[in-house]
Amino acid sequence: MRIDVAAFEFIDRLKGLSRVDSVLADLQREVAKVGLDHFLVTGLPMPNQPLSPLVLMNSWPDGWFERYSEQNFFHRDGVGQWALRTTEPFAWREVPPLLMRQPIAQQVMNEASDFKMADGFVVPMFSSRHWQAAVSFASPDALELPERSRSAVHLMSIYAVNRVRQILGEVPSPERVLTSREAECLTWIAAGKNAEDIGDILGLSTLTVQTHLRNVRTKMEVATIAQAVAEAMRSGEIRI
């Protein structure tokens, strides 16, 4: 089954899951199909804040999380620090070299490899007000994720974390109402069009489309348009 089809089936299943461990076990089964054997669902600590209290789920190899926490590696880990600075999913190899060439960052990567975490993929997520979470995936082998797989893992992560937070009572399920034009623009984004394409389709200027999409992100309290698409699909605001 194609990973993008599996992602939407996963999203449909989430509605019937009422236990955090069930959500995360289902996510683990799906991402294992693309070579992601381990993952951590966690809040992102600020300077001088420990990681451990922010962790929602840990499926890292035995011993590695304890080592990572005890040594306070997050604040010196190039992957973790890049997760604090970007809104876009990224593979470990895409972290800027300046963050990865520090001796302590290299030590973290070497020790992770010793625990059979040789490569990985991270999905950072935050609202317009504050950091929320990241899902950090790892693989024992060099990772090659096609764009379709990256997008599917991104989407499943957003939905899984949102479902976990709902189960834990951390977020309400408010009514979010988009205008018809905002929903139309977002639907075309979900279909793979960019702002210029949408402007041509709808007879709008590119600037007007960008304004609609910015309003969507503000209303939904998300940082990226990918998160807006996921949330709008979850709430039924748009369908593709």
Image (cartoon, helix red, strand yellow):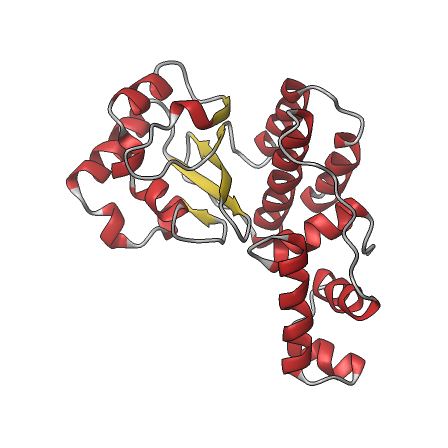
User: What is the x, y in percent for residue 50?
Assistant: 34, 27
Q: Residue at x 45, y 28 (%)?
A: 54
- Asked whether residue 1 is in view, the answer is no
Q: Is residue 153 left or right of residue 176?
A: left
Q: Residue at x 62, y 67 (%)?
A: 214
Query: In the rendered image, which quarter is residue 52 located in?
Result: top left
85 w.r.t. 32: above or below: below
Q: Which image quarter holds the C terminus?
A: bottom right
- Asked whether residue 222 is in view, the answer is yes
Q: Residue at x 31, y 54 (%)?
A: 96
User: What is the x, y in percent for residue 51?
Assistant: 37, 28
Q: Is residue 128 left or right of residue 233?
A: left
Residue lying furthest top: 62
User: What is the x, y in percent for residue 188?
Assistant: 75, 67
Q: Which image quarter holds the N terminus?
A: top right
Residue lying furthest left: 103
Nearest the camera: 12 or 7? 12
Q: Residue at x 70, y 41 (%)?
A: 7
